[in-house]
Amino acid sequence: MAALAAGALAVVFVNMLIDNRPKGDPQKVEGYVPWEKDSLEVVESLPLQDGGRIKPFATYAGFKMLQLHGARSMEVLGKGGEIFKIKPTEWLMDTLMRPELAVNLPTFRVDNSQVLEAISIETKGRRDRYSYAEIEPGIQKLVDLAQSYEPIEKKQRDPMQQQVIDLAYNIRSYESLLGYFSFARRGVALRGTGSEAEADKRADLSAVMTAAPELMGEVQAANREKREVEPRLQDLLQQVLNAANYSKYGMFFLPPKNASDTQWQSAGNAIMGVMTMESKDPETAIADVKLMETAVRSVSVSEKEFRKHFTEFKERIEKRADSRGELQRIGMEVSYFKTDYFLNALVWFLLGTLSALAMWGFGSGKAGKILSWVTLGFSVIGAVYCVAAIVIRCLIMNRPPVGNLYDTIIFIAATGVLFSLIVEWMSRKRFALGLAPILGLGLIILARRYEVGDAGDHLDPLVAVLDSNFWLATHVITITLGYSAGLLAAMLSCGYVLMRGLNLDDDNKDSRRALTKAVYGCICLTVFLSLVGTVLGGIWANYSWGRFWGWDPKENGALMIVLWTLAILHARLGGIVKEWGLHLASIFTACIVAFSWWHVNFLGVGLHNYGFTAGKGTIWVFYGMMILFILFGAVAMIVEYYDKQAKRAAKHAVVKGLEA
């Protein structure tokens, strides 16, 4: 049993490493030096608005890097041949303030080299990471190709076509970040102010904004008099428009003074608001832009100067955000992602898994008993990390713990481990104890893989129909607890099938009975939670959509869990299924739970379809594994049956021989 579990664990880890590790040596970035720690600490907690909420710069950087790079760190070969590890805040600071270095960072993960071959870019391997500078020669061709694929319905696109479109969008998103502070670095050129020997003079954009009433008055006068605007003024205004467009999207970190205005502004919004005379508070906007110019330009002087001026800008922003009541959780969120609770939980669950395998390997001896306590300790510490993370997430989001698919994975991980420990406390057979860290480890790995695949901020506000703390705390949590209990029952049954089918328990009937009782109890808990959750969901649906039941895929999935688990319990009570039948049916419960929990989100229909797309391959692998367990159990049951029949026949023959 221990060897089988160790082999499965090794396969999962090797696959994860292959999928996430870049190929080859770190990319060389000539002259690269990392930001100083003090600079990172100043910038990481800058508040900005994104995804419908106020979040720190570090969070925005983390998910943006995850979206483009497929990981939250990268390694480069920098100044002096030294290898530097770049994290999200550093990466985004490079992109915004040191674009001449950033264009050479391996920012873009390309999973299919054919995408680059199609735009005549030299490739490194089937899957690797590339810099903007490496892709730049083929960008126009990439955009043209993406535009030709976009009319194709998304479901009809092949993987390469979709990856071309995704890469084109990622490139455009990155370009908007690269050029965001171009207005601050260069200002605008004053055409005709130079000479043959000297270039035209340049002016700060904030100075042009200050002169906006006079400049726009001249434009209005020209329009009234039906004459052309003076060419140099036209050129100046075009430069301002270009600069504003570059900094219009992505980074909204200018909170309005007026509390009734919910939308924060980008630098481009502030610039255009002043230049078009539509700004409600032009003085504030001009001062904001002036501080940005000073901070960005000070990067070339020294990081000490940069920190000084950026701190001034940040304190100004924080003061406005605090007056609006939008600053309270910024520090907590920065700390949450820095601590990386789920990575810590994964480490403890991994240690617990290794000790569980050793515990099963040593059996019931003294070493096995010691290892059981070690396994318990590791599992409890991992669970504490999970629970602490979930509590902190609730405080940051200001809602109950489960609201999106990522939430359900980590919640099921925590509750699955706790349920396993409760089962162990009741059975004392050390099987549920060993299963606890394995279950936690598998689900945390799934959560991390889903996070990479989805690359969306799972702390963002929910869609309007889900935005109800009462129903999230009742219906959603109850249903999710039902998923957790159903999956635990299936995992216990998988263990039962392996142990009995391979005779790993030496035909220990006490252990088998204990496992059967545990599975029966988990199925009872599943049907109770699923039934209550389904009824609560119907009441919520009636409140939100005006009907209790609508045969929606998610509703059907919940009903399937209730009906299937009720059928198992009735069959067991009626003697229709014995131990083997109970466990095989319990394993199939995992397929039904997975369909209701995960698969319905891929169907693209129904009121419960919230656009989740990551993990399509994983779900089919999971179904396949469960079916294999069922087939193995069925074969083992048949073999055991005929083996018993043969033994009875042999025994009967011996008795008849003695009688004769």
Image (tube, helix red, strand yellow):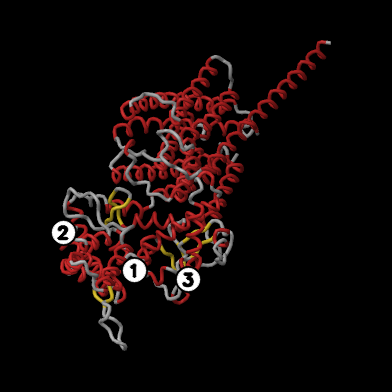
Q: Nearer the viewer, residue 321 or 18?
A: 321
Q: CA distance from mark 1 to mark 3?
A: 20 Å
How packed mark 2 is, by other alpha carbons closer than 10 Å (few <14, some 14-19, many 20 or more), is some
Residue plotted at (55% across, 50% down): 159
* Res. 115 image quadrant: bottom right
Location of residue 276 with respect to 434 vertically, above or below: below
Q: Name the residue tied to disc 3.
A: 77
Q: Name the residue tied to disc 1.
A: 97
The outermost residue toward the right is: 660
Where residue 112 sits in the image (x, y, percent)? 56, 56
Question: Of helix, strand and loop, which one carries label 2?
Answer: loop
First along the sequence among labels 2 and 1: 1
Which amino acid type corresponds to the residue marked 3 in the rendered image?
Answer: Leu
Q: Name the residue tied to disc 2.
A: 281
Question: Of helix, strand and loop, which one carries label 3?
Answer: strand
* Res. 513 image quadrant: top right
In this picture, residue 546 sits left or right of residue 368: left
Location of residue 95 with respect to 1 vertically, above or below: below
Q: Nearer the viewer, residue 100 or 410?
A: 100
Which amino acid type corresponds to the residue marked 1 in the rendered image?
Answer: Met
Q: Quadrant of the C terminus?
A: top right
First along the sequence among labels 1 and 3: 3
How packed mark 3 is, by other alpha carbons closer than 10 Å (few <14, some 14-19, many 20 or more), is many
Question: Of helix, strand and loop, which one carries label 1?
Answer: helix
Q: Determine if residue 491 is in view.
A: yes
How packed mark 1 is, by other alpha carbons closer than 10 Å (few <14, some 14-19, many 20 or more), is many
The outermost residue toward the front is: 226
Which amino acid type corresponds to the residue marked 2 in the rendered image?
Answer: Asp
